[in-house]
Amino acid sequence: MKKLTWYNEMGFFNNPFSIKPAAFHNTILGYDDLIDQMNQKIGESNILLLGGKYGTGKTSILKMIINEFKGKKRVIYYNCNNKEGPINFDKLLTNLNFFRRIFRIKKKNMIILLDEAQDLDKKDILKIENYYEQGFFKSVLLVSQEKISALTPSIKKKFANNQFMVRDITTKKAIEIIRKRIGDIDFISDKNLTLIFNKNKNTRAFLKNCEDVFRCAYGTGENEVTEVHIKQILG
């Protein structure tokens, strides 16, 4: 028989502090309004920029956008970390099905999501603009955790009003996210959730810290998380 995990023993089917992208799609880190705005902009045909530090939820937002537009193979996702030279956009546009691949027919009106866009070079940026102007890309979303140094003045002008930033959440939102995941159980107080959050306000780090503290407290047989457990794990 498979051994139960600590969270199974506590009555949770899955890890309530999972940091996997959109594992809890209904608690998308407080960015529902931002996602709605971005979906509208993408649907209208635009070039957009989504920025934010590592661990603030950009990948989860990307996944929600993909789910919104994935019908009829309209979305191309590409992680710029994988590139070993200029991106072959022709290949991305013709690899969508066998017929297009054989006859090298590029599909138009595609939505392209470029993750880790800080790794783009000037040749990539110029191609993106060109394919956008020709209608191959209906919308372009550049996602970056750093400044994109290769941006041209013309593409900056195109997304001047379409820049979105993902920032660290507030204490109130942090507690709300955890309560939506674990409910109003007495195992941890809002006060101690605040103590954990104040150790590191990055969303990903906060969830991981909550998991570590919970595991520690439950493993000692205690009925609740105390400041001792928080100090033991987080210092």
Image (cartoon, helix red, strand yellow):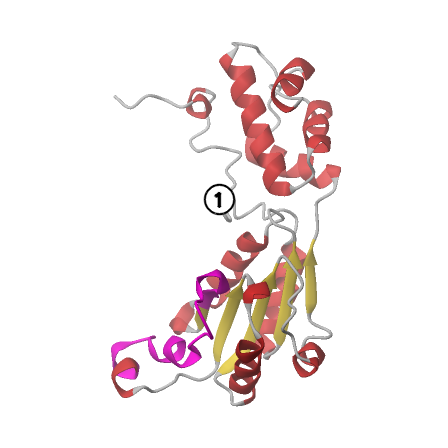
Tell me where the magenta segment starts and ends, as one range.
Answer: 77-100
- The percent coordinates of residue 164 (x first, y second) are 69, 63
Q: Residues within 10 Å of mark 1 (few under 14, many from 20)?
A: few
Q: Is residue 89 left or right of residue 221?
A: left
- The residue most toward the bottom is 134
Position above or below: 180 against 148: above
Q: Which residue is mark 1?
A: 20
Q: Is residue 72 left or right of residue 46?
A: left
Q: Is residue 75 left or right of residue 40?
A: left
Position above or below: 209 against 222: below
Q: Secondary structure at mark 1?
A: loop
In front of the other: 85 or 133: 85
Residue 88 on the magenta span: yes
Q: Which quadrant: the C terminus?
A: top right
Answer with the quarter of the image where residue 180 lies. top right
Q: Which quadrant: the N terminus?
A: top left
**Residue appearing at x 52%, y 67% in the figure:** 114
- The percent coordinates of residue 50 (x first, y second) are 63, 63
Position above or below: 124 against 80: below
The amino acid type of the residue labelled 1 equals Lys
**Residue appearing at x 50%, y 74% in the figure:** 111
